[in-house]
Structure formats: structure tokens, C-alpha cells
Image (tube, helix red, strand yellow):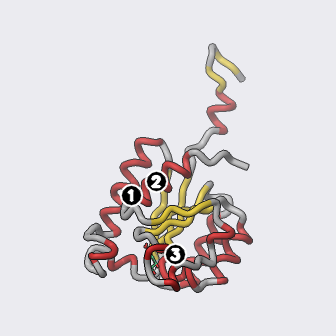
């Protein structure tokens, strides 16, 4: 249906891109935890910045943290049909979790792996990411800005 130059059907179908930000274990301690590595910015501050940028870009976001592997798996599974992209800082589970990797592969949503620190410049056990092969890409080492870079990257992902 077109009235004047407005395509109302297209407008009705249009919905904002929705991005799910997931944070793994110990990220609730940001701001106090090893500040020489992770800085002084809290996860609440990061969320506020992400929400501000998302509003500018016209994207909807949900921002969650869990210390439990199973809860992260459940959230990835539930994201299907509700979110367009997952941005995942799996924290230590990055290096250990086959369960998270299988959830990402099983759900098939575009997923971006992020880290505050440059994991490749740290201990050897952090160089290996079990989730990287099933993610679109990795953003690592930009501190809180890793989240903003991932948000910008998400916006540019074309729906498959
Ligand atoms: C956070 C963690 O908690 C570590 O286990 C990862 C990641 C790196 C980060 O830099 O955001 O190795």
C-alpha cells in the first residue's frame, strides 16, 4: 500500500536491529578487578556507553552478564528470532568452552567475539579461542571501546 510516497507495508515490516551483548565470568568485577589489565571502567559504565551509541544508531540492545556457562548457553539459544546479532565477551570461557562454541554454531546467529584486553599479547593460554572459528570476527584490545566497535560492526552486518 502506497499513500503519497510512503510505503506503509515496508514501514510496518521494518524493525530496529536488535543486538544482544553477553558478558561472561568476572566481568561484573570490572573497575576493581586487575585495573592495570582491564582499566577502571565498570560494566555499568560500558553498558551506558553502548546504550548511548545504540540510541544514536537506532539499534535496540540487551546487555547481560553471567558467571555461569549454562546461563550464557541458554541466552544464546533464546536469542534466535529475537536478536539479529550477538556480541559476546565470553571472558575466560573463550578459552575453555566447547558448550558456548556449539551454542553459537547451533543457533547460527552472527556473533562477534570481543575482549577488553589484547588476548594475543597476554599469557599463552589466552591466545586460543574456542569460539573464534564460529564467530564472524574478533575485536580484542581496545578496552571499553571494543564494545562500541562491535556495535558499529553489528550495524553493518547484512541480514543473511
Ligand atoms: C576477559 C577475561 O576475563 C579473560 O578471561 C579473557 C577478557 C580476556 C577480556 O579481555 O575482556 O582472557
Please tell me how crowded label 1 is: few (under 14), some (14-19), or many (20+) other residues with Cα within 10 Å: some
Element marked by disc 2: helix
Q: Is residue 73 above or below residue 83?
A: below
Q: Earlier in the sequence, mark 2 or mark 3?
A: 3
The quadrant where ligand 1 appears is bottom left
8 sits to left or right of 20: right
- List the residue tagged with mark 3: 90
Neighbour tally class for label 2: few under 14, some 14-19, many 20 plus, Cα within 10 Å? some
Measure how far apart labels 1 and 3 are at the Cα level. Answer: 16 Å
Q: Position of residue 43 (x, y in %)?
A: 35, 69
Residue 53: x %, y % from top left: 40, 48
Label 1 sits on residue: 145
Q: Which mark is residue 149?
A: 2
Q: Earlier in the sequence, mark 1 or mark 3?
A: 3
Number of dots carrying numbers: 3
User: Label 2, label 1: how many angstroms apart (C-alpha)?
Assistant: 6 Å
- In the rendered structure, the answer to whether residue 81 lies left or right of residue 30 reads right
* Residue occupying image coordinates x 27% and y 76%: 35
Amino acid at each position: 500500500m502506497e499513500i503519497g510516497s510512503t510505503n506503509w507495508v515496508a514501514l510496518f515490516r521494518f524493525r530496529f536491529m536488535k543486538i544482544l551483548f553477553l558478558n561472561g565470568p568476572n566481568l561484573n568485577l570490572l573497575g576493581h578487578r586487575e585495573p592495570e589489565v582491564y582499566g577502571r571502567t565498570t560494566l555499568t559504565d560500558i553498558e551506558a556507553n553502548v546504550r548511548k551509541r545504540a540510541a544514536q544508531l537506532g539499534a535496540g540492545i540487551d546487555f547481560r552478564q553471567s558467571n555461569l556457562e549454562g546461563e550464557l548457553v541458554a541466552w544464546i539459544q533464546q536469542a534466535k528470532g529475537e536478536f539479529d546479532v550477538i556480541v559476546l565477551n565470553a571472558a575466560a570461557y573463550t578459552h575453555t568452552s566447547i558448550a558456548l562454541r556449539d551454542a553459537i554454531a547451533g543457533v547460527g546467529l552472527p556473533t562477534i567475539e570481543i575482549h577488553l584486553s589484547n588476548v594475543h599479547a597476554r599469557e599463552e593460554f589466552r591466545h586460543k579461542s574456542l569460539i573464534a572459528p564460529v564467530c564472524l570476527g574478533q575485536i580484542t584490545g581496545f578496552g571499553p571501546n571494543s564494545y562500541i566497535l562491535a556495535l558499529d560492526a553489528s550495524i553493518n552486518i547484512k541480514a543473511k
